[in-house]
Amino acid sequence: MAMSVCKRDGFPLVEIGGQLQCVAEFLNHCLGLEPIVDVAQRDKTLYYIFENGHELPLLCYCCNEPLACDNVSAEREKIRGLFLKSMIWDNEIVDGREVIDFRLELTSPTRKNDVLQVQTSVLSASRLIHPTTCAYKDQVLAASSRRRHRRH
């Protein structure tokens, strides 16, 4: 199965709000250069919480299951204050199937050359929690409502 990629930058396209979106453009719009102010674990899923109110769930890149953390306090200490600088991806074969190895590159405002890579699924973007002030919030809610109505 051929994966669709963005014509502008070559990143994978992911269904968000019922439409295919470039994962990099979408995450950059919502999270780019926003500091991470907290780390939380809810329902066995680890979330990075950004200053602008977005909450990014971390999912396993190969199975899309939630990533949990044994020591949230240590993760919070390591991640808080970093911001999304860039993203990278590549195809990888895991258990005989092709998956997207997607990584967030986080850095510090004071040490921009020190980059921490965090591996997650591109589907983390489709599960991003948006604050009420985000332009994407209504789009995602409308698509969610359409999906609920189709199930009946």
Image: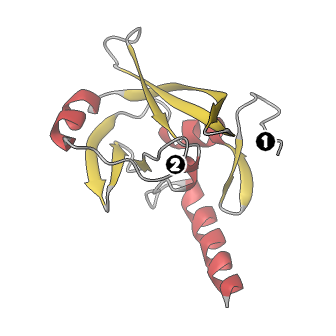
- In the rendered image, the residue lying farthest to the bottom is 152
* Image x and y of residue 55, in percent: 40, 50
Task: Please say if 24 is above or below 132.
Answer: above
Residue 124 is marked as 2
Crowd rating for badge 1 (residues with CA inside 10 Å; few <14, some 14–19, many 20+): few
SS for dot 2 = helix
Q: Is residue 97 left or right of residue 128?
A: right
Residue 144 position (above or below residue 86): below
Which quadrant does the C terminus fall into? bottom right
Kind of residue at badge 1: Met
Residue 123 vs 147, above or below: the answer is above
Tell me which amino acid carries mark 2. Ser
* CA distance for labels 1 and 2: 17 Å
Label placed on residue 19: none
Q: Which residue is rendered at x = 64% and y = 41% of the image? A: 23
Residue 36 horizontal/vertical position (percent): 33, 36
